[in-house]
């Protein structure tokens, strides 16, 4: 079922922040949980509690199908940020060395800078002006104390897709743990944790997986949980007679009552992705992005950042209009053209330094599966009218 | 006539129990989810009860797919 944009027609180009609209199935699943089920999963054993548990298991299984892993290797978190914090703060200790790229979001950079202040050694490998990481530079940065390489699958600023498989081969060959931030790609680009040698995969539930906000998760390779401390401890509904935190997956990292209503929505969102087919979703988003890139390139007074065409990026386009600040442009897009977009630094100052747009930032259009060619044409018209003659 | 005896499969947490339940449903092995009997554990979880003659069938269905913590005769 297609979503209904309602009686307030807008052009929603902020899908890189959170996707909208959501599939009707996702909303129905959340209504069904609240109206018909309502139990606390894994806590009580009555049949409504078990039904709630089944909803969460089904969400895990849908994600496991998407990533090619076992369902119980997936931990649910409130977002990709929390998943990354577990992977970084739970794993790295004083004296360890960690490698990341200069295109990372603050969800990676801030925990790493904090850890650096506590004695973790950090190398930030520079990327090209288009935001691309060279795997050879990562290989060169590896030392004997290197325990982790953490990179985003695609940049939230430029959409630049990093060569994950190659990076995975390098980390595997050097016995280094490989952590991927898939906030921008889970649900739209193929991710197979085994083929890409991914040890830790952090994902957002509310972007291309079409779940609600407040959902995300972390895949942890078998055995690695022995080396990663949880950030939050408490009741899990399991091993209740013991005062020590369980050491098994996923309970070790899932303390407290989970976001069952959110996970009901996430499960339905992932099943929507599986039913539509990720290739069909990617193909549509790519063609919208290509159309927009080509249209922008034909205009004077526009600077486009990131890879030259849609094949090298997700459906994200960062650009600037000469002599118009991104925030000023965004206000015009919203008020005059009802286009929702995101200006500024996108929580990624390092990425903006890399592409040369710090500190003014860029205008970012993040397209999604429910956008149309007509919306792209309208957007190009709007951009044209904001160019100063 | 001897009455049929039951056994329970115990799991680390309800996620595992529900995964096992799903597998048994797929394979049409008759089972029931019950609260873990008090004399086995004071845990608040649920376990899978089957008749004792289905033990081998359940073990081979779950083998390699979901780990169980123990099997107890009721």
Image (cartoon, rainbow, N blue to C red):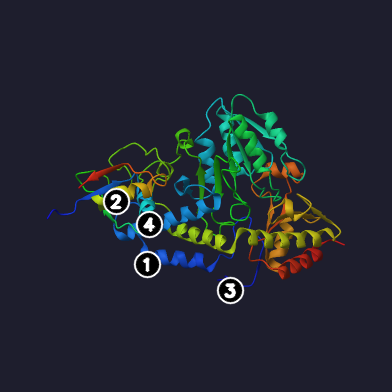
N-terminal of the pair, mark 3 or mark 1, is: 3
The C terminus of chain A, quarter of image: bottom right
Q: Nearer the viewer, mark 3 or mark 2?
A: 2
Look at the numbered disc 1 and give the secondary structure of its residue.
helix
Chain of the residue under the numbered disc 4 shown in the image:
B
| Rendered residue at 64%/47% (across/down) | A347
Look at the numbered disc 2 and give the secondary structure of its residue.
strand
Inter-mark Cα distance, 4 to 2: 20 Å
Left or right, residue B70 beside residue A268 = left
Left or right, residue A112 beside residue A361 = left
Left or right, residue A389 beside residue A359 = right
Left or right, residue A31 beside residue A286 = left
Look at the numbered disc 4 and give the secondary structure of its residue.
loop
Question: Tag 3: Cα neighbours inside 10 Å, few (<14), some, or many (≥20)?
Answer: few
Disc 1: which residue: A36
Disc 3: which residue: A6
Kindly tell me whether residue B42 is visible in this rendering. Answer: no
Q: Residue furthest front?
A: B1
N-terminal of the pair, mark 4 or mark 2, is: 4
Q: Which mark is residue B27?
A: 4
Inter-mark Cα distance, 2 to 1: 22 Å
Same-chain status of marks 3 and 2: no
Marks 1 and 3: in contact by CB < 8 Å?
A: no
């Amino acid at each position: 079922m297609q979503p209904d944009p309602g009686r307030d027609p807008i052009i929603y180009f902020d899908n890189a922040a959170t996707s909208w609209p959501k599939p009707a199935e996702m909303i129905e699943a959340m209504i069904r949980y609240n109206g018909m089920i309502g139990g606390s999963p894994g806590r009580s054993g009555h049949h409504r509690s078990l039904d709630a548990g089944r909803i969460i298991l089904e969400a895990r299984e849908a994600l496991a199908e998407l990533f090619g892993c076992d369902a119980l290797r997936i931990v649910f978190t409130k977002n990709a940020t929390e998943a990354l914090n577990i992977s970084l703060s739970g794993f790295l200790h004083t004296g360890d060395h960690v490698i990341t790229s200069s295109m990372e979001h603050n969800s990676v950079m801030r925990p790493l800078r904090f850890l650096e202040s506590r004695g973790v050694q950090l190398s930030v490998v520079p990327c090209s002006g288009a935001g691309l990481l060279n795997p050879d530079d990562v290989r060169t940065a590896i030392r004997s104390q290197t325990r982790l390489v953490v990179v985003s699958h695609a940049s939230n600023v430029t959409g630049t897709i990093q060569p994950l498989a190659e990076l995975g081969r390098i980390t595997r060959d050097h016995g280094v743990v490989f952590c991927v931030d898939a906030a921008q790609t889970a649900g739209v680009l193929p991710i197979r944790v085994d083929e890409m040698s991914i040890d830790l995969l952090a994902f957002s539930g509310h972007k291309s997986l079409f779940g609600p906000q407040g959902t995300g998760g972390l895949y942890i390779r078998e055995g690695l949980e022995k080396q990663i401390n949880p950030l939050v401890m408490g009741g899990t509904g399991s091993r209740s007679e013991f005062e020590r935190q369980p050491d098994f997956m996923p309970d070790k990292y899932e303390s407290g009552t989970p976001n069952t209503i959110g996970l009901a929505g996430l499960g339905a969102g992932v099943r929507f992705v599986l039913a539509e087919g990720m290739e069909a979703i990617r193909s549509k988003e790519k063609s919208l992005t290509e159309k927009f890139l080509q249209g922008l390139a034909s205009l004077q007074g526009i600077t486009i950042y990131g890879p030259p065409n849609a094949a090298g990026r997700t459906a994200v386009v960062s650009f600037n209009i000469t002599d118009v600040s991104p925030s000023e442009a965004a206000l015009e897009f919203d008020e005059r053209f009802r286009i929702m977009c995101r200006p500024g630094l996108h929580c990624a100052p390092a990425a903006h330094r890399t592409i040369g747009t710090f500190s003014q930032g860029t205008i970012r259009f993040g397209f999604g599966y429910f956008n149309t060619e007509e919306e792209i044409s309208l957007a190009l018209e709007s951009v044209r009218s904001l160019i100063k003659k | 006539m001897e009455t049929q005896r039951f056994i329970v499969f115990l799991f680390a947490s309800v996620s595992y129990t529900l995964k096992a339940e799903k597998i048994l449903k797929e394979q049409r092995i008759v089972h029931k989810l019950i609260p873990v009997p008090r004399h086995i554990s004071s845990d608040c979880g649920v376990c899978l009860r089957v008749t004792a003659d289905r033990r081998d069938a359940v073990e081979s269905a779950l083998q390699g797919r979901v780990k169980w913590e123990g099997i107890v005769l009721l």
